[in-house]
Image (cartoon, helix red, strand yellow):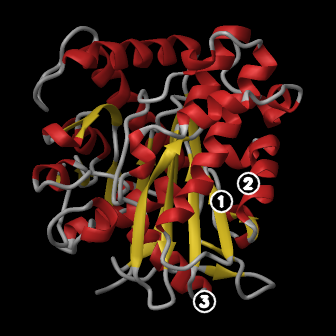
Amino acid sequence: MTMRRAIGLMSGTSLDGIDVALIESDGESVRVTRSGNDRVAALGPTGYRGYSEEERALLTRALRDAESVGARTDRPGCLPEAEAFLTRAHAEAVESFLAENGLTPADIAVVGFHGQTVMHRPKEKLTVQIGDGAALARRLGVPVVADLRAEDVARGGQGAPLVPVFHRALAAAAGYRGPLAILNIGGVANVTLIDADGGLLAFDTGPGNAPVNDWMKEREGKAFDENGATAAGGVVDEALVAWLLRHPYFEKTPPKSLDRHWFSHKLAGHLGTADGAATLTAFAARAIRASLDHAAARPTRWIVAGGGVKNRTLMSMLESLLDAEIVSADALGWSADFLEAQAFAYLALRSVDGLPITFPSTTGVAAPAPGGVLHDP
């Protein structure tokens, strides 16, 4: 298979904006540009389209209205408005990205469109990501692969995490061998554990940034705890963290996944602002630490991506808990901010080629499974 350019799009559970990333891949390996240290390798340009407060409020309402969804095609409440906005915003993000990088639609083989998850209930074989892939393909004039989680869930998988196969390709490109952990801390945190033979085990570790973000929004009117500064000034409620970690989710054998709203910031409602931020941050860190209970071999290196890598308090907690080398994805020439968008570009190429994107050890699906729906312009 030949190397092709693909664009990946990601709007995550933190509801901050749209990540755009371009990679070159044949659906198996990824092309990297090395500089200096031979393990520092860049994939391609990236871009970002942030959401305004009004747009974020619309998506937040959509999450609430989606609670009554009973089928993938249901669009109650404001979901039709949110879906139209989301599709338009993603089109604008791609158009700006192409212009800024001197590219045309003809330069791009496919776009991987994750959409916005508004409902994720794998036990009910239900996962909903709003976003109109067909409309996006028509506007861009580029093939679009959307609905990347639905096939896995329909086959009995968790539908998440989807990124591990891309993590393995990145590790191979960097020359890394296991045991290695690649940790993404978004609204929910997930980990990919790669063993010495390249075997994968992946699952959601627990909450990531979402409870802290919601806490800061409610208490301070801020989108997040910048640099973890508020948490740094607080005291962890150890009893509450211990109680939260007794949730049955943490004992469940992976693969496993959870919804953004499983662990609410309101659980810390009796605490002051700083103490609540510290407690919710500690909960995320210790849930990540608890993921080691499922590892066949303890990773000697953790590569961390996602918005949580900017939270100094969270990163400091992880350094004290994991007893291993911890490095930001940025330090490797990867991208802490855009790793998931890059992954969806990679998954779109695999989808077009009919290659599996999920596996028994990553989502619990019975056999390696394809995924995604292709929309031609």
Q: CA distance from mark 2 to mark 1?
A: 10 Å
Q: Quadrant of residue 361?
A: bottom left
Give amino acid for label 2: Leu
Give the x, y percent position of residue 107: 39, 64
Q: Determine contact: label 2, label 1, CB under 8 Å.
A: yes
* Residue 328 can be seen in this image: yes
The answer to whether residue 102 shows anywhere in this view is no
Up the image or down, 195 lies above or below 281; here it is below
Decide if residue 374 is on the left or right side of residue 99. Answer: left
Q: Which residue is mark 3?
A: 175
**Does residue 130 sit above or below 156 in this rendering?**
above
N-term mark: 2 or 1: 1
Secondary element at image label 2: helix
Q: Crowdedness of circle 1 by 10 Å Cα count: few (<14), some, many (20+)?
A: many
The tag on residue 128 is none
Which residue is disc 1 drawn over?
A: 304
Q: Residues within 10 Å of mark 2 (few under 14, many from 20)?
A: many
Task: Judge by depth and name the residue closer to the eye, 12 or 111.
Answer: 12
Mark 2 or 1: in front is 2
